[in-house]
């Protein structure tokens, strides 16, 4: 048997202000830590969901993004005619030859502009993305100057609500629908008819070709054949891989910055815990001596103070995590450096992040509590009894 | 003098506690300063922009180019003293991680518009003569160890193929805020190579840079330029270089806002630590405060003691933290290389650090000082165990 | 196992000194004496005489430099620290001048504390603590915290804590030093009862002659040496 938990717990409760301030400092660190993980996870989920299994994105070799890619009509035709591609209605290949450009749009409530990705999709464009559905309005009519806007775009940019118009490429474009792409990257895009957009932008080439394979397992042979074709200089990637690479830079940035900040900030919180725990040991020297005289061992004392520090950490962890969970209501929208276009994603909390955050808080508690606990355990009984 | 001595002695009574608190403050003030410097670096492009330069780009977005024929039409406008142009190249040096900006520019005119890029005349001459030559900034040269005469291959992402350049000149920045992480090469070389490859998009430029005689006319000239090309195939959008650069920053505003918020969070974290230190210290000395009161010292004296001790600790943390900011910022700048072209600690940042430390010192002392000033003498003396 | 004549505490040639800077300051020099089982002995002497040190040594919270110290058949000078802790839990009950109760625990919990080191089940512990508290007259104060009790009441809780494990010896260091006369008398009466009714061996350090009168025997310490037995 060891020192009762109620003894440890009530000591924390007795020093309310100190406990509150120490756990509060830790809570802020955990908040930063959890928020960063949630942001990373949000970005990951957004991009993972953007790619559908079995879908393949074809772009020009080493273009990296669809915006920088150029695929001419002959190349596109070769890609479309591969035998691995699934067939849809009327026996047509499930392929979408798309044109992707960036347009600069002004944000609502300010004159600041940002780049929005506008995608001209072929007739199979919607079919290839089952996660996209219409939230309001209707789909654009092929061959018209109608467009539909992603949910995040519609919320953020002027002239992108249903019934509103945008002017670019010397034409007026009417927004006829808002699409809900289930928090994927398509929420941050505007879609229109590929041919109409190409005419408006005076383009004769596509940006990318998206195809659905009969069987995702046939991707290697599909890629091998296209890469071996001397007429083509293309990059062939699974859609999920393609989108993961799109945000590599942003994801790394968030991850590195977040980890560095968490570590630096945690030094502050650990020092806070250390100060508190040293004071706790110093103020309770007599109690420690008494417990030892009663027959409790050094290890019991060490454990008692470590548990006290762990409880502090746990309190900070729970509070920080609770604070961070409110961040789920927010969506962050920023330019993705690689695609140069705006991308919206939200803070996503899951069990793993919650567990990591709490573990981080406990580690801070132990880091702050270990030296003071060791000092408590080392105290000489006679000296500490005399300290009264 | 006695008062200060008393404060100092008090601060040094719990050496371990005071030491830890100062250490925490140093870390927090340092982190705060670095985060503010990161935010400054974000805006450095706009900071270094000239008010006498305008940037004209395609109205749709930067991705769309403008015909090279616009050059003459803009140059002839009143108030325009010079014009040059540049294309974003977007090449990769070995791996995509090695990011630095590259522009194809009009070699003869571009550097006249940018007097802040200081190039030795002999090197400038060598660059103009060599069609495949390039000019790089000092920071870029230092990061990758490039010297004049070195080969510098780039893999094109927008313009396909591998492009082999030779470093002909290295420019220095006239000011600390000048971006010296860029690479410039001949627009003619780019254009001709693309023509030979049979590309459709030739004779196009990314942006025009316009120098105007009087910065006060910036708005008017911008409007005139855009009016001239309204309803043409490539409509333009003209703004000052500063507005153009700020446009970039605003696209990543969410990140800047997040870093700003976080920079204040670290101050709150250390405030919690510091407030705890002062609260514990004051609680342990309640009997002493009561004794001092019994001796006839007023509540103001006691409050002064506590505020003084708190501020002394905060001052120590601030001085060390600020002093460390410079070497750490320098080291960080070296680590990230050309990702942050300009990374310098501004005087404003130092003031902010000092102010944050002072605020923490005052806020941490507030509650303990209030309590000490109000403690009844008899009750305080009784707690003398 | 032992004959009744065997003393419960047997001290032979015990020495103890403390280091003060470079110097060694002798506190106890070559002390030998016995305490019989069931004794109630008072140790007296001026401050610095070594009486508290002697008590600490007998109670096993301090270690002698030389000599032997057998308590209840065990030479505690040879025990390791962990063994000593277990030995204390089983054999010694402590009573301190300032009670040394845990301020965050109730009277009940304070008394229960030493039982947590035994293998007793919860129900047994509860029964024992209730009995102990009623023996010291605090059956109605079980849920009170130390700060809600008078000094005399706190010391009675401490005494309940001291005999709850049924130890062989009770050691008391100035048990009445912080109490008024009336409370002190209560405490002394309680100690006498524990000695008379439960047969506890009690060793009490005090500088109060009034308190010492409760004991069967008084031993004086002077500069680390015992007086001749009376």
Image (cartoon, coloured by chain):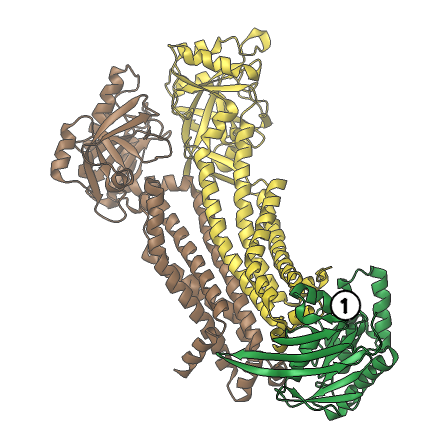
Whether residue B158 is situated above or below residue A320 in the rendered picture: above
x and y, in percent, of residue A190 in the image: 49, 27
Where is residue A114? Give x, y as percent: 42, 36
Q: Is residue A358 visible?
A: yes
Q: Is residue B207 left or right of residue C211?
A: left
Residue topped by disc 1:
C90
Image point (33%, 48%), residue name = B343
Residue B226 in which image quadrant: top left
Quarter of the rendering containing residue C57: bottom right
- C56 relative to B221, above or below: below
- The residue lying toward the viewer, choosing from A66 and B309, is B309
- Quick check: A340 above or below A233? below
Residue drawn at (44%, 31%) of the image: A116
- In percent of width and height, residue B93 lies at 32, 30
Q: Is residue C187 left or right of residue A314?
A: right
Colour of chain B, in one word, is brown
Eyeballing the image, is A270 above or below C52?
A: above
Q: Which chain is green?
A: C
Q: Quadrant of the N terminus of chain A?
A: bottom right
Instruction: Label 1, secondary structure: give it.
Output: helix
As drawn, the chain in yellow is: A
Total residue callouts: 1
Which residue is painted at 25% across and 46% down in the image? B216
Is residue B367 at least partly visible in the picture? Answer: no
Of the 4 image quadrants, the one containing the C terminus of chain A is bottom right
Residue A160, image x and y in percent? 49, 32
Within 10 Å of the Cα at label 1, are there few (<14), some (14-19), or many (20+) other Cα atoms?
many
Q: Is residue A283 left or right of residue C160?
A: left
Check the residue under mark 1 and report the chain it is in.
C
For this rendering, which residue is in front, B239 or C15? C15
């Amino acid at each position: 048997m060891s020192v009762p938990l109620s003894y440890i717990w009530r000591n924390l409760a007795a020093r309310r202000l100190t406990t509150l301030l120490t756990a509060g400092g830790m809570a802020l660190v955990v908040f930063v830590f959890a928020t960063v993980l949630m942001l990373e996870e949000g970005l990951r989920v957004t991009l993972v969901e953007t790619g559908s299994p079995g879908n393949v994105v074809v772009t020009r070799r080493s273009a990296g993004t669809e915006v920088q890619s150029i695929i001419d009509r002959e190349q596109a035709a070769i890609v479309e005619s591969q035998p691995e591609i699934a067939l849809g209605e009327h026996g047509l290949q499930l392929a979408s030859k798309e044109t992707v450009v960036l347009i600069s749009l002004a944000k609502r409530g300010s004159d600041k502009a940002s780049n929005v990705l506008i995608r001209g999709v072929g007739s199979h464009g919607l079919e290839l993305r089952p996660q996209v559905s219409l939230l309001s309005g209707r789909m654009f009519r092929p061959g018209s100057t109608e467009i539909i806007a992603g949910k995040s775009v519609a919320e953020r940019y002027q002239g992108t609500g249903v019934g509103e118009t945008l002017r670019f490429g010397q034409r007026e474009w009417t927004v006829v629908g808002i699409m809900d792409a289930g928090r994927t990257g398509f929420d941050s895009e505007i879609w229109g008819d590929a041919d109409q957009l190409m005419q408006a932008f005076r383009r004769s080439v596509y940006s990318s070709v998206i195809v659905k394979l009969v069987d995702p397992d046939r991707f290697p042979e599909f890629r091998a054949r296209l890469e071996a074709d001397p007429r083509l200089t293309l990059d062939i990637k699974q859609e999920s891989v393609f989108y993961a690479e799109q945000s590599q830079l942003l994801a790394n940035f968030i991850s590195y910055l977040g980890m560095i900040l968490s570590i630096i900030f945690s030094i502050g919180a650990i020092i806070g815990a250390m100060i508190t725990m040293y004071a706790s040991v110093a103020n309770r020297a007599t109690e420690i001596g008494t417990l030892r005289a009663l027959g409790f061992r050094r290890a019991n004392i060490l454990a008692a103070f470590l548990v006290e520090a762990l409880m502090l950490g746990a309190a900070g962890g729970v509070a920080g995590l609770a604070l961070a969970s409110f961040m789920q209501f927010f969506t962050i929208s920023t330019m993705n450096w690689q695609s140069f276009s705006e991308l919206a994603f939200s803070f996503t909390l899951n069990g793993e992040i919650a567990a990591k955050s709490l573990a981080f808080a406990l580690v801070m508690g132990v880091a702050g509590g270990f030296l003071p606990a060791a000092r408590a355990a080392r105290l000489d009984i006679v000296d500490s009894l005399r300290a009264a | 003098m006695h008062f200060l001595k008393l404060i100092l002695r008090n601060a040094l009574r719990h050496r371990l506690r005071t030491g830890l608190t100062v250490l925490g403050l140093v870390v927090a003030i340092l982190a705060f300063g670095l985060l503010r410097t990161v935010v400054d670096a974000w805006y450095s492009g706009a900071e270094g922009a000239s008010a006498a330069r305008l940037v004209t780009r395609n109205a749709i977005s930067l991705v769309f180019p403008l015909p090279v024929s616009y050059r003459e039409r803009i140059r002839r406008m009143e108030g325009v003293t010079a014009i040059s142009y540049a294309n974003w190249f977007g090449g990769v040096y070995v791996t995509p991680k090695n990011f630095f900006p590259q522009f194809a520019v009009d070699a003869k005119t571009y550097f006249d518009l940018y007097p802040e890029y200081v190039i030795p005349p002999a090197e400038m001459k060598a660059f103009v003569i060599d069609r495949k030559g390039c000019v790089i900034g000092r920071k870029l040269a230092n990061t990758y160890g490039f010297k004049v005469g070195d080969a510098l291959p780039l893999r094109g992402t927008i313009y396909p193929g591998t492009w082999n350049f030779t470093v002909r000149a290295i420019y220095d920045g006239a000011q600390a805020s000048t971006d010296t992480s860029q690479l410039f090469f001949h627009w003619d070389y780019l254009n001709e190579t693309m023509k030979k490859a049979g590309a459709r998009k030739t004779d196009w430029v990314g942006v025009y840079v316009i120098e105007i005689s009087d910065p006060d006319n910036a708005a008017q000239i911008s409007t005139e330029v855009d009016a001239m090309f309204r309803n043409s195939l490539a409509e333009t959008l003209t703004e000052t270089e500063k507005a153009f650069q700020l446009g970039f920053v605003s696209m990543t505003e969410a990140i800047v806002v997040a870093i700003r918020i976080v920079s204040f969070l670290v101050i709150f974290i250390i405030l919690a630590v510091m407030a705890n230190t002062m609260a514990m210290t004051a609680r342990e000395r309640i009997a002493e405060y009561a004794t001092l009161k019994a001796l006839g010292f007023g509540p103001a004296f006691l409050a002064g003691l506590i505020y003084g001790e708190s501020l002394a600790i905060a001052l120590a943390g601030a001085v060390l933290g600020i002093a460390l900011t410079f070497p750490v910022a320098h080291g960080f700048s070296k680590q990230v290389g050309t990702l942050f072209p300009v990374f310098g600690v501004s005087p404003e940042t130092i003031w902010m650090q000092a102010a944050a430390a002072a605020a923490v010192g005052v806020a941490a002392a507030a509650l303990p000082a209030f309590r000490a000033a109000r403690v009844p003498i008899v009750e305080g003396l009784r707690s003398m165990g | 196992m032992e004959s009744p004549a065997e003393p419960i505490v047997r001290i032979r040639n015990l020495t103890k000194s403390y280091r003060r800077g470079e110097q060694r300051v002798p506190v106890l020099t070559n002390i030998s004496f016995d305490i019989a089982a069931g004794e109630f002995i008072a140790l007296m002497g001026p401050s610095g005489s070594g009486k508290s040190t002697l008590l600490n040594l007998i109670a096993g919270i301090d270690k002698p430099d030389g000599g032997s110290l057998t308590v209840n058949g065990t030479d505690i000078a040879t025990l390791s620290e962990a063994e000593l802790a277990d030995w204390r839990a089983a054999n010694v009950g402590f009573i301190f001048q300032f009670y040394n109760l845990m301020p965050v625990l109730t009277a009940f919990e304070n008394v229960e504390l030493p039982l947590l080191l035994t293998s007793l089940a919860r129900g047994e512990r509860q029964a024992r603590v209730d009995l102990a508290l009623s023996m010291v007259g605090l059956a109605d104060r079980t849920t009170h915290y130390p700060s809600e009790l008078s000094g005399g009441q706190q010391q009675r809780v401490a005494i309940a804590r001291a005999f709850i494990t049924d130890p062989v010896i009770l050691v008391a260091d100035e048990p009445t030093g912080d109490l008024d006369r009336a409370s002190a008398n209560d405490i002394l009466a309680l100690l006498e009862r524990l000695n008379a009714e439960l047969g506890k061996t009690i060793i009490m350090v005090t500088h109060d002659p009034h308190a010492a009168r409760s004991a069967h025997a008084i031993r004086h310490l002077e500069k680390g040496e015992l007086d001749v037995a009376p």
